[in-house]
Image (spheres, rainbow, N blue to C red):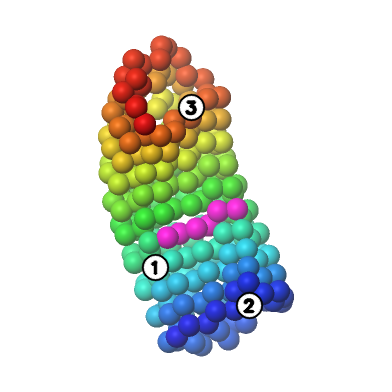
Amino acid sequence: QTLYLYSNSLTGSIPAELGSLTNLTSLSLRDNQLSGSIPTELGSLASLEYLSLKSNQLTGSIPAEFGSLTSLQYLYLYRNSLTGSIPSELGDLTSLKYLYLYSNQLMGSIPAELGNLVNLEILRLSDNSLTGTIPTELGNMASLRYLSLYDNSLTGSIPAELGGLSVLTTLYLHSNSLTGSIPAELGNLASLEYFWLYSNSLSGSIPSQLGNLASLTELKLYSNQLTGSIPTELGNLTN
């Protein structure tokens, strides 16, 4: 039920035949020198709960067939050279807790369907070439503790709906092309500790409601186009 070949110097491509291991619950090929594309056949591993292919030299796109892995809780594909867009089918993985796709060359927009992942705790899509806006549907991810979208080319405004992520501790949206004002609703994120919005094109004033973020330890808003005065309420952020 477990196949761990991680942290070796394995080369070549991932065999499509691994898709025949239908009882497999954990597959880790991480930290090797594997190349080629991810076999679509891995979408047949219906019992799979853990899949890590991170830190290889994989190319091509993320198989839409991964949407069939309904038992999957942990999906680690980061630090490869994956291209194409994020399949909307990943929104069918309702058991998923950790989704790590950062440090690839993924393009296109963030699928609104990811908002269906109500059990997701960590979403890391940073350091890609993602475009388009941040879907308002991400505000439906009631279990989300960590949201990292930095170092992309995201545009549009920050959705006010993100203010409903009541257990969120980390929000990294820096180094994009986001515009508009900072939503006052983000002042509702009572668990938030790290709030980084620097290096965007945000305008308007700093919402006084940010003074309600009692758990906050780091607030970085530099390199934007913010105007107005500094809210006195920021003096409440004693952490």
Q: Quarter of the image holding residue 61?
A: bottom right
Position of residue 28 measured from the top left corner of the image (x, y, whole percent): 54, 74
Precedes in sequence: disc 1 or disc 3: 1
Mark 2 → mark 1, Cα distance in angstroms: 21 Å
Q: Amino acid at mark 2?
A: Ile
Q: Which mark is residue 14?
A: 2
Q: Quadrant of the C terminus?
A: top left
Instruction: State yes or no: residue 100 in magenta.
Output: yes
Position of residue 113 measured from the top left corner of the image (x, y, whole percent): 38, 55
**Residue ID at (51%, 77%):** 27
Name the front one of labels 2 and 1: 1
Q: Amino acid at mark 1?
A: Gln
Span colored in magenta: 98-103
In the rendered image, the residue lying farthest to the top is: 229
Mark 2 → mark 3, Cα distance in angstroms: 43 Å
Instruction: State yes or no: residue 18 in magenta.
Output: no
Precedes in sequence: disc 2 or disc 1: 2
Check disc 2 and report its element: helix, strand or loop. Answer: loop
Precedes in sequence: disc 2 or disc 3: 2
